[in-house]
Image: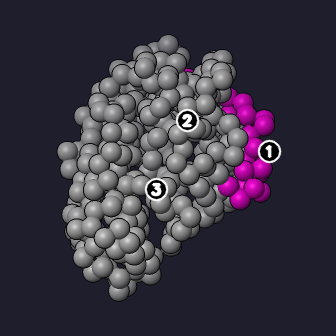
Amino acid sequence: MKDRLIAYAREAGFADVGICRPDALPALAGRLEAFVAAGYHGQMGWMAERMGWRGDPSALWPDARSVIMLAENYAPEHDPLAILGHPDRGAISVYAQGRDYHDVVKKRLKKVARWLVAETACEVKVFVDTAPVMEKPLAQAAGLGWQGKHTNLLSRDLGNWFFLGAIFTTLDLAPDEAEVSHCGSCRACLDICPTEAFPAPYQLDARRCISYLTIEHKGPVDAALRDRMGNRIYGCDDCLAVCPWNKFAVQARDQKLAARDDLQAPALAELVALDDAGFRARFSGSPIKRIGRDRFVRNVLYAIGNSGTASLVQQAAALIDDPDDAVADAARWAVAKLRAIT
């Protein structure tokens, strides 16, 4: 059954499959508690909630006997760092340039889960980044890869450009051997981080991470970090893009995950003018939509302030009295920066 499951999952489009026990992570609870105690989770209060489930996957569903972890490749065709050389354009993380991966991966997961139920009459629960499930440690326990020094999952076959999905099941399947780190002495991901968000290898302080700041953080961003954000308006791929293991990555197969033309290098001048309706229309079907117009335009204004493009002053100035306080604050900051160079 395990061999047939793996074959079906690959046929369904997944790049890799691994299996572990729900209780395969005895050290996870302590690691999670230390992360939260240090305040590294920032405003992500949900990291501290339901700690019992996050720290012990076997507590999430006591009837589960196996966790099937699946990898969905989204490796880009282009160099994700090239956009950083065009400061009048917005840099959007590769994973958010196509369709919302939650929808794409979950649809494929459900297909595999339905097949498994039909074949074995087992029970299943499907998760894609929307429940208190620590996907990366589970994926390492299932042999899909290891959490690198940047804390993201790495694979010797896929690099680090892949999503994770989980199927918890009452079916008792033979677990795979856990993967170990193959980072060696490499520090590429740590050294490239614009905001020095890694206190140590394998540790991330989300409060300094640009992905967190542009997506999860509400309100104004610390003024000391704004300059370092550059033109990154949604997420940050720097630590992923420099990983040497990406030489083994292959281009994503599912065209739904392919980058939209209008999201690869969008003009800041267009994005800053978006009202709520325009924002919703432009990012329909995109994960970007969930942060809302205000937070997104706040990010765009920080990028405008860092652009050195004096012609954008008027557009930034038009938002100084924006109803959202964070947007208005970002507009004032951007105007002041741009006027200082003219």
Q: Residues within 10 Å of mark 3 (few under 14, many from 20)?
A: many
Please state which amino acid type lies under the numbered disc 2. Answer: Cys
| Image point (23%, 45%), residue name | 260
Position of residue 259 measured from the top left corner of the image (x, y, whole percent): 27, 41
Query: In which quadrant of the rendered image does the C terminus lie?
Result: bottom left
The residue carrying mark 3 is: 229
Sequence-first disc among 3 and 2: 2
- Mark 2 sits on what residue? 189
**Label 1: which residue?**
30
Residue 213 visible to an observer of this rendering: yes
Residue 317 lies left or right of residue 46; in this view the side is left
Q: Is residue 23 magenta?
A: yes
Tell me whether circle 2 and circle 1 mark residues in contact (CB < 8 Å): no
Q: Is residue 118 left or right of residue 64?
A: left
The residue most toward the front is 342
Residue at image location 27% in from the left, 80% down from the top: 318
Ranked by sequence position, the earlier of labels 3 and 1 is 1
Q: Residues within 10 Å of mark 1 (few under 14, many from 20)?
A: few
Bounds of the magenta segment: 17-40
| Total numbered labels placed on residues in the image | 3
